[in-house]
Amino acid sequence: MSTFFKASDVMVNQVVTWYQQQNFCSMNPEAQASMESLYTEPDEAPDPMAGIQIALNALMLAEAFDDARFNDIAARAASTSSKAELRHILDEFSLCLRPGSLSAKLMKD
């Protein structure tokens, strides 16, 4: 397996762990802060980077698992401006990543 695919596997597995558990403490500090901001001060608009972070990671998993559910999650995350809706999207994301829920094996090549 090439170095690229090994690194990709590591990243995909890390993203799966973050969103399965909704525990973002091992993200880089800026990403972690934007994700955690979804759970603070509910009346404020979300950090725009939170939706972008969710969307990018969902797109990566859509490609890795060949699973269109993640494309839908990405589109909704990128276009919402509500903390409550982003939290709902995170809950959906987490459910899609439960063991046995993924529609395809991780693509290696």
Image (spheres, rainbow, N blue to C red):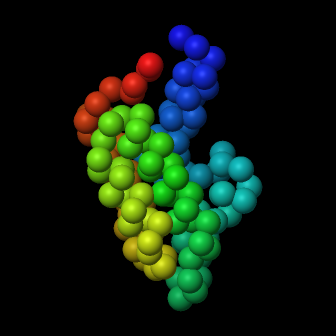
Q: Residue furthest front?
A: 109
Query: Can I make out residue 21 in this image?
Result: no
* Quadrant location, the N terminus: top right
Name which quarter of the figure residue 33 lies in.
Answer: bottom right
| Side of 33 relative to 70 (left or right) | right
Residue 10 x %, y % = 57, 28
| Up-down relation of residue 73 to residue 88 (above or below) | above
| Side of 8 relative to 108 (left or right) | right
| Side of 38 relative to 107 (left or right) | right
Q: Residue furthest top?
A: 1
Q: Nearer the viewer, residue 46 or 5?
A: 5
Q: Nearer the viewer, residue 22 or 109?
A: 109
Query: Can I make out residue 4 in this image?
Result: yes
* Quadrant location, the C terminus: top left
Residue 94 x %, y % = 38, 51
Q: Nearer the viewer, residue 69 or 85?
A: 69
Q: Residue at x 51, y 33 (%)?
A: 13
Q: Residue at x 39, y 62 (%)?
A: 75
Residue 52 x %, y % = 55, 62
Name which quarter of the figure residue 34 lies in.
Answer: bottom right
Q: Residue furthest bottom?
A: 43
Q: Residue at x 47, y 43 (%)?
A: 60
